[in-house]
Image: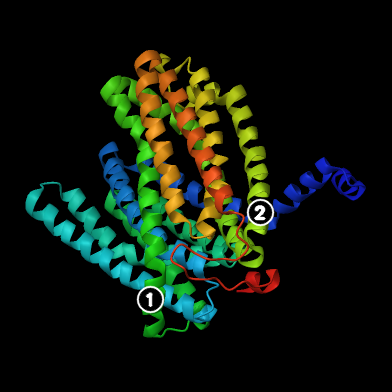
Amino acid sequence: MRVLISAADGSALGRIWYRVVRGASRDHALALTDQAIVSGTSLLTTLLIARWSNPAQLGVYTVGTTLLLSIVGFQESLILEPYLIQRYYGNTTAAERAGAALMLSFGFSALSTLICAVAAFGFLELSDSREMILTTAAIAVIAPFALTRNFARRLLFARLEFRDALVIDVAVAVVQLSTLVWLGWKGQMSALSAWVAFGAANAFTAIGWLYHARADFIVRMRHVSTVLKQSWPLGKWLLVGQITALVQGNITYWLSISVAGAAVTGLFAACMSIVGLANPMLLGLGNSIMPRSVIAWNNGGGRQLFHEALRNTVLVAILMVGFTLAIVFAGEKVMTLLFHGAEYQGYRHVLIVLALSILAGALGSPAQFALAAMERARLIVASATIGSVATVILVWVLMTQWGLLGAAYGLLGGGAIGSVGRWIAFLRVAHRTAPVSDNGMPGRPRSATSARAL
């Protein structure tokens, strides 16, 4: 009630708060819930494998997970994000563009299966690891279903249909976790059987979704060619940006093991696992912020996109400040609870600085989403490269002087520089009033109602 009164009275603070609260809508809540289901399923899968098998099986499953996540990441950069951003182009209908994107996803799935199959044969010839051979072969079979399920999620996010995406992910969680529990109860748990459970859950939901949503797609090969030509100039830069972000996220581990040794690296990984509890929240927000940024850009150009980015930044700041305060008061206790041993104690200062680094990086994400909506992927790569270089220099210098705490401050500095770079890049181009991409393809502005309906 106070929020509404303040806004009505004309208070600047009241208006800002009202917009933030209105922005934190049902869609944001559903997106956060959906990501919590996905992340929770992944965590429970890890715990169930650890409970009913051995560390070797868990290690093989984890390596396979990194492979599959890389494949999914390439699909998102090359196909799904360009589809989300370019779906308002006027040279195809919504159903035709969705059908073209689906065909491109199927083609990518076939290529991924072929590459994994070749890799499995390579392991068969060059390696004695039976488990890795079977895991790679399993991923070759599973990849099309996992990629189709991910396509369904991203398509629904683009349309702001978060409830339907939540239904898909709940179905995957129920099938996957119940199968894993049954396997463990029967004493059949292994990395391979866990992949069978994962594949069955994704196949069940992917096939069911395709049948249910078949009327939403019109497939014509000339549109597939058109969409490919439009998406490639953007997708290749988004892929480079993702690789740059991946390097920035892992460079500290590489520097740590070379400068301070494996023991310090292990302690750093333990600390990062605590502050990494914020990742599901950030991923969930991103699932909602990105399509809203695209709609704002197509509806109102740079001005409306700027206001959308500003509202999203305030929302991210509120949630991340709350998380940082939780780390300040309870982070060390949580770390002591999860990691037993005296060597894991006394890192409260490090945890706080790492939480601040997550906060600093997160504040730049709305600007990055806005740049992606404007198809300014080169600016994303440029700002990410600046942040990565700053991170490498700061972590190297500060870790040499102050060890683990220095590495944390290096991450904080690199994250802050990267976020400032993204905002500077966005503000330089936000004055545009018409959606025009780097490759010269104009968008087709729509009203808010029609954009949301597609």
- Look at the picture and state if 185 lies above or below 201: above
Q: Position of residue 210 (x, y in %)?
A: 46, 75
Q: What element does badge 2 sit on? A: helix
Quadrant location, the C terminus: bottom right
Q: Is residue 160 visible?
A: no
Q: Is residue 253 left or right of residue 452?
A: left
Task: Give me the residue at 37% from left, 69% from top.
Answer: 105
Q: How many marks?
A: 2
Image quadrant assignment for residue 249: top left
Q: Residue at x 40, y 44 (%)?
A: 245
Q: In the image, is residue 192 above or below residue 360?
A: below
**Front residue of 204 and 220:** 220
Q: Circle 1 sits in a helix, a strand or a loop, which is it? A: helix
Residue at x 18%, y 53% (from the top left corner)? 133
Q: How is the image coloured?
A: rainbow
**Mark 1 or mark 2, whichever is nearer to me:** 2
Give percent across and percent down for residue 13.
81, 40
**Labelled pair 1, 2 in contact (Cβ < 8 Å):** no
**Alpha carbon of mark 1 to alpha carbon of mark 2: how far?**
32 Å
Give the percent coordinates (x, y) of residue 281: 56, 44
Callout 1: few (<14), some (14-19), or many (20+) C-alpha neighbours within 10 Å? some
Left or right, residue 301 beside residue 108: right
The residue that label 2 is drawn on is 308
Name the residue located 42 percent from the left edge and 38 percent from the top edge: 386
User: Which of the two labelled residues, at mark 1 and mark 2, occupies the earlier sequence position?
Assistant: 1
| Residue that carries the numbered disc 1 in the rendered image | 103
* Residue 333, position as x, y percentages in the image: 54, 22
Q: Is residue 194 left or right of residue 155?
A: left
Which three-letter amino acid code belongs to the residue tagged 2?
Answer: Glu
Three-letter residue code for mark 1:
Met
User: Is residue 13 visible in the rendered structure shown here?
Assistant: yes
